[in-house]
Image (cartoon, grey):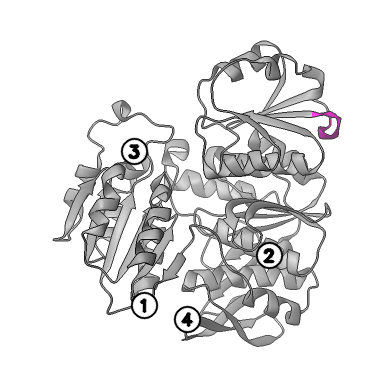
Amino acid sequence: MNNLETYQNFYFVGIGGIGMSALARYFHASGKNVLGYDKTNTKLTQLLMSEGIDIVFDDIIDDKITTLEKEKTLVIYTPAIKKLGILDYFNENDFEVLKRAKVLGLITENTNCIAVAGTHGKTTTSTLVSHLCKEADLPFSCFLGGISENFKSNFLFNGTEFSVVEADEYDRSFLNLSPDWAVITSTDADHLDIYGDKNTIEEGFRQFAALVPDDKQLFVRKGIEIGRAHKTYAVNEEADYYSDNLRMDYDKIYFDFHTPTETVKDFVWDVPGIHNVENATVALGILHNLGVDFETLKKAIANFKGIKRRYTKHIYPGGKIYIDDYAHHPTEINAVVGSIKTFYPDKKLLVVFQPHLFSRTRDFVDGFAESLSNSEELILLDIYPARELQENFEGITSDWLLEKVTLDKKEISGLSEAFDKIKEKEFDILLTVGAGNIDTLYDPICEWLNKM
C-alpha cells in the first residue's frame, strides 16, 4: 500500500463508531477529504458533519463514491460491519481497504506512542494521559474510546511527536500498534466470542506487552502476570508507582503518590472511585517519566473533568443523584456500584441496566446476576445485540438473566418504556449503565430531574 500521506481521500465505513470517528477527525485535521457511511445518525455523526465531514446513512453507491480515484483513496472499515454494498463496491473495484486497527497502527509507527490496554479502565486512563499531555503542552495527538469532558472530543491534535492511543483488545486489534510506552490495566476474561477462554485473552495481552521495546516503559497493574519485566502500579499497596492515603472531603478525593524515589502528597480531584485513583496513578507515572514536573501534574489532575458516560454524575437540588456509566462487564458494574455504596451507603439505589451482546451475557451471566443484586431495585432492559443475532443464541435473554438476580424488586423493560417506569420509582440514586443505546435515556432523565 501507499504511505498514508499520499492519500487525499479517506472513506470510513462505519464512521460513527467511537474509534472510527477519532481517526476520521485525525485525517480531517490533517487537511484530507474525509467522508463515510454509518447505519445510524447519532449525536456523534451530527458533530462530525458539523465539523465538515460528509456522511451518508443509506447503503447506496452514489457519485460521491464513484468519482473517487482508487489510487488517491484509502477505505477504512470496522469489523463490526459484516455485509454492506458500499464495502463490496470498494473491494470489487480494487480500492485499498484496511481495518481501522491497521491504519491506527501505521500512525503509531511514526510517533512516540503511548498505548493503553486492558479489559477495564483503558478509556479513563488513556483520556487522563491525554489530558495530562495537553496540560503539559506536549506535542501529541490522541485517539480515544470515549468523549473527554475537558476537550469535548475523542480526538485532539496538538502535534505529532507523541500519540496516545486506546489499545483495543477486540479482534486482537492492539497487536497492530507500535507502542513505545504501554499500560495494561486488566486482563479479565472478555470478548470470549473472539478469544474462546481466559487463557487465550491473557496470551493476547502478553503478545501486546512484547511489542514494547523497553522494560522501563511498560506499566502493568500489580498482580497481573505479563511474562516479561515491567514497572508495576497499584493503590493502597506498595509497587514501583503507587497511591495511598485516600480520603474524601466534600466530594473531593485526596491521595498521595509514590515513585521509586519520592512521595508527593495531596493530589486532589473530584473523580470518584478507588479504581480511578489507580488509573491516575499510572498516568502520573508515565508523565513523570516523560519529564513533566509535579506542580504541573497536580494542577492537571485537579482540573480533569472525566469522560462522558464514565461515572457521569449529577446532583439535583431536591437531593436526588443521577449517575450514567458505560460499564458492560460484571467487574465494571461492581466498581461503579461499589463506589456508590462506599460514598452513599444509606441511599436507595435504582439500577437500569442494558446488557451488551448475547455472547457476553451468556459467558458472564452469574457475574452479572451477582453485581446487579447489589442494588435495591433493578430495571433490566432487553439485550443490545450489536453485531450479533438472537437466532444464534437461543435462550440467552434478559428474562433468563433476571431469574438469576436475587433482588425482590426487579423487572424487565423495553428501552422505549424504561423512562416512564423510572418516573414511577422511589430512589435516592439512579444509575443507568450499559454500552448499547441506553444513552438515549440520558437527556430525558436529566430534563425530568431538573424540573422536580
* Mark 2 and mark 3 residues within 8 Å of each other at the beta carbon: no
In percent of width and height, residue 316 lies at 39, 72
Q: Nearer the viewer, mark 2 or mark 3?
A: 2
Which quadrant of the rendered structure holds the C terminus?
Answer: bottom left
- Find disc 3 in the rendering and name its residue: 358
In percent of width and height, residue 405 lies at 20, 55
6 magenta-colored: yes
Q: Earlier in the sequence, mark 2 or mark 4?
A: 2
In percent of width and height, residue 290 lies at 79, 68
Q: Which residues are magenta?
A: 3-8
Q: Earlier in the sequence, mark 2 or mark 3?
A: 2
- Find disc 1 in the rendering and name its residue: 342
- Find disc 4 in the rendering and name its residue: 251
Left or right of residue 418: residue 82: right
In percent of width and height, residue 166 lies at 62, 51
Distance of mark 3 from mark 1, alpha carbons?
A: 31 Å
The residue depicted at 47 percent of the width and 81 percent of the height is: 251
Q: Earlier in the sequence, mark 3 or mark 1?
A: 1
The residue depicted at 68 percent of the width and 64 percent of the height is: 131
- The amino acid type of the residue labelled 4 equals Asp
Q: Quadrant of residue 219?
A: bottom right
The residue depicted at 44 percent of the width and 32 percent of the height is: 387
Q: Quadrant of residue 378?
A: bottom left
- Find disc 2 in the rendering and name its residue: 131
